[in-house]
Image (cartoon, rainbow, N blue to C red):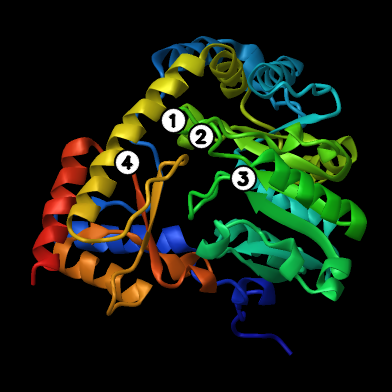
Amino acid sequence: MRRTSISIEAAERLKKLPPYLFAEIDRLKRELTAQGKDVIDLGVGDPDLATPSFIIEALSEAAKNPVNHRYALDQGMPELRRAIASWYRSRFGVELNPDSEVLPLIGSKEGIGHIPLALINPGDLVLVPDPGYPVYKSGTYFAGGQPHLLALLEENDYLVDFSSIEENILERAKLLFLNYPNNPTTACASKDFFTSAIKTARDCGFVICHDAAYTEIAYDGYEAPSFLQAEGAKEVGIEFHSLSKTFNMTGWRVGFACGNAKILELLGKVKSNLDSGIFQAIQWAAVKALASGREEANKNSKIYERRRDLLVDGLNALGWRVPKPKATFYVWAPVPPGYTSQELAARLLKEANVIVTPGNGFGPNGEGYFRMSLTLKDERIEESLKRIKKLHSR
């Protein structure tokens, strides 16, 4: 019997996913903009600062060379892997073998989304921080895994409390995602915390994947440590890093993972079947960024630090209780009494045309908080404070 039409239905793995948080925010922003509204977007964390000119020039020169127009190597150019290893040695004092302990990525998001495919079988348990970056959970679903949410609580400085996790959960876990400095809470972790996590992973037999995208955006003299600085880290895990936030290169899509050679080999096998590597001209630009970009990264942090002070001091002057973050370009703030996270975000959007991210969009334990980004110029932050003040006084 011949069918007269086809049935197109989402796969079950897609049905499990909530709407991707930042895609929904972008949709709402487009709607308001189309209505002629002046929207101030403090939601998505996308740097407004330009990529440094010397990185753009490196890309331009490399793009002119026909050698770079062909398929790239899946494992990345040797020159880029060596540059990453050199950067880790200089920044963190960590020695990496560029041939086996470094894997370039098409942005760290790509690697984070793919790592469950390399390590997780259907039904396997993955420990996911809550609130947390949505890709930890969605990558787990795509691999057929089962996310187990770990509450990041203000009273525990938003650190994972391993002593509170049931023993049978720890024994079943195959993978733990960590992220410090943390998105969205801005919390920072010490090397002692990482040491504790490594001991738990070793005792229980699970892998750690640490997302370190925000280590280079820090304030007041703070220097965020690397997970790989803790003793035994390479035995149990890997660390993801990105040039996106450090060098204002979000659209370039270049990052890397480093650490345990076997884990990287498995991730590399997934990648070799799904992508063909990073455009080589971008890889050459990344080499230049890692070799010469430390001063620019420090300048970026100073700019974000000024914006942090402007936004937090302004909110606190309205009577809100907002702490100053030590790192990341976010502010994580308690919702004022009388609102849920969603209700506050909706009111700011509808009545002030200011976009903030409701905390529950990052997971159930984000309820009662909201996130604001520092990726806007001072005058736009000042304007957002004026609009919030008008609402606050009503």
Classed neighbour count for the residue bearing mark 1: other residues with Cα under 10 Å, few (<14), some (14–19), many (≥20): some
- Residue 135 in the figure: left or right of residue 323: right
Cα distance in 3D space between marks 3 and 4: 20 Å
* Residue topped by disc 4: 308
* Residue topped by disc 2: 244
- Residue 26 in the figure: left or right of residue 378: right
Amino acid at circle 2: Ser
Q: Nearer the viewer, residue 288 or 176?
A: 176
Cα distance in 3D space between marks 2 and 1: 5 Å
Foreground mark, 1 or 3?
3
Query: Considering the numbered disc 1 on the image, is that residue within a helix, a strand or a loop?
Result: loop
Q: Residue 164: percent from the left, percent from the top?
A: 72, 70
- Residue 217 in the figure: left or right of residue 190: left
* Residue topped by disc 3: 189
Classed neighbour count for the residue bearing mark 4: other residues with Cα under 10 Å, few (<14), some (14–19), many (≥20): many
Foreground mark, 2 or 3?
3
Query: Considering the numbered disc 2 on the image, is that residue within a helix, a strand or a loop?
Result: helix
Amino acid at circle 1: Asn
CB atoms at circles 2 and 1 under 8 Å apart? yes
Q: Nearer the viewer, residue 178 or 158?
A: 158
Amino acid at circle 4: Arg
Amino acid at circle 3: Ala
Q: Which mark is residue 248?
A: 1
**In the image, is residue 341 above or below residue 55?**
below
